[in-house]
């Protein structure tokens, strides 16, 4: 294998870990299996990560960051709240369809960690990453859309994550795009219902429902 930079080596190992976990399960994602998938030596692994646990945390961060980036890109300044939420959900869904193995790996990782004593802290870390990313998106929308949230951001973030988990799990199970689209319409209505006009931004209602303004 050609010599890689440290960043390229870490990226290759993250992608290899995702592939192994999605295909064979977390139990099979040993350091040896991961470096074999990445076509690297075992020594190369230890130049990039101190442990398998550190790599697993990097896998979680990579997937969550990708989700956050594509969703954030869909937030249009001064756009309609519901349409913006729907666009952000669609951006996430498009990424899911492009790389379903990533989300499959994340579910596998969550379930395995819950059953494995030495990984007992990992489910909270993984879920906390989702909540943090969702809260970041909601907070980014405030100045861009000229809104405020009628409930605490962490509360809305928890609702958004719960709905997104359901969307993801259902689509991975049946690959029904039409059903996913209907669910995203409901999700957009729900999240937009928590948006109010920011103080000083005018009195016009900004919450939209599917098919028209309230």
Image (tube, rainbow, N blue to C red):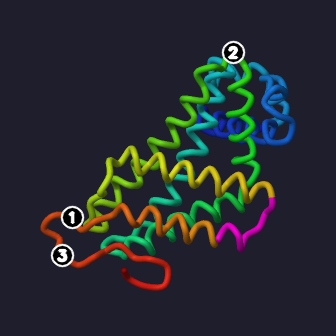
- Can you name the residue that lies furthest to the left here? 200
Mark seen at residue 20: none
Give the extent of the magenta segment: 174-181
- SS class of the residue under badge 2? helix
> Pointer 3: residues within 10 angstroms few (<14), some, or many (20+)?
few
Quadrant of the image occupied by residue 82? bottom left
Point out the image quarter for the N terminus.
top right
Q: Position of residue 183 (x, y in %)?
A: 62, 66
> Pointer 1: residues within 10 angstroms few (<14), some, or many (20+)?
some
| Residue position marked by numbered label 1 in the rendering | 198
- SS class of the residue under badge 1? loop
Q: How many marks?
A: 3
- In this picture, residue 42 sits left or right of residue 138: right
Point out the image quarter for the C terminus.
bottom left
Q: CA distance from mark 3 to mark 1?
A: 9 Å
- SS class of the residue under badge 3? loop
- Can you name the residue that lies furthest to the front here? 214
Which of the two labelled residues, at mark 2 and mark 1, occupies the earlier sequence position? 2
Which of the two labelled residues, at mark 2 and mark 3, occupies the earlier sequence position? 2
Quadrant of the image occupied by residue 208? bottom left
- In this picture, residue 53 sits left or right of residue 71: right
Q: Is residue 134 magenta?
A: no
Q: CA distance from mark 2 to mark 3?
A: 53 Å
Q: Position of residue 15 (x, y in %)?
A: 71, 41
| Residue position marked by numbered label 2 in the rendering | 117
Q: Is residue 175 magenta?
A: yes
| Residue position marked by numbered label 3 in the rendering | 203
């Amino acid at each position: 294998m050609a010599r890689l930079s440290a960043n390229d080596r870490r990226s290759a190992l993250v992608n290899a870990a995702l592939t192994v976990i999605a295909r064979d399960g977390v139990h099979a994602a040993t350091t040896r299996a991961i470096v074999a998938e990445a076509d690297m030596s075992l020594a190369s692994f230890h130049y990039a990560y101190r442990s398998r646990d550190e790599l697993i945390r990097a896998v979680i961060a990579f997937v969550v960051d990708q989700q956050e980036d594509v969703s954030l890109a869909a937030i249009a300044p001064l756009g309609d709240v519901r349409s913006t939420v729907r666009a952000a959900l669609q951006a996430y869904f498009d990424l899911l369809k492009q790389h379903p193995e990533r989300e499959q790996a994340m579910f596998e990782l969550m379930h395995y960690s819950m059953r494995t004593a030495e990984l007992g802290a990992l489910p909270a870390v993984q879920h906390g990453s989702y909540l943090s990313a969702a809260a970041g998106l909601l907070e980014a929308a405030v100045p861009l859309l000229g809104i405020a949230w009628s409930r605490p951001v962490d509360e809305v973030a928890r609702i958004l994550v719960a709905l997104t988990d359901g969307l993801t799990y259902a689509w991975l199970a049946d690959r029904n795009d039409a059903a996913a689209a209907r669910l995203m319409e409901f999700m957009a209505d729900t999240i937009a219902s928590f948006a109010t006009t920011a103080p000083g931004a005018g009195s016009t209602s900004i919450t939209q429902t599917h098919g028209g303004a309230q």
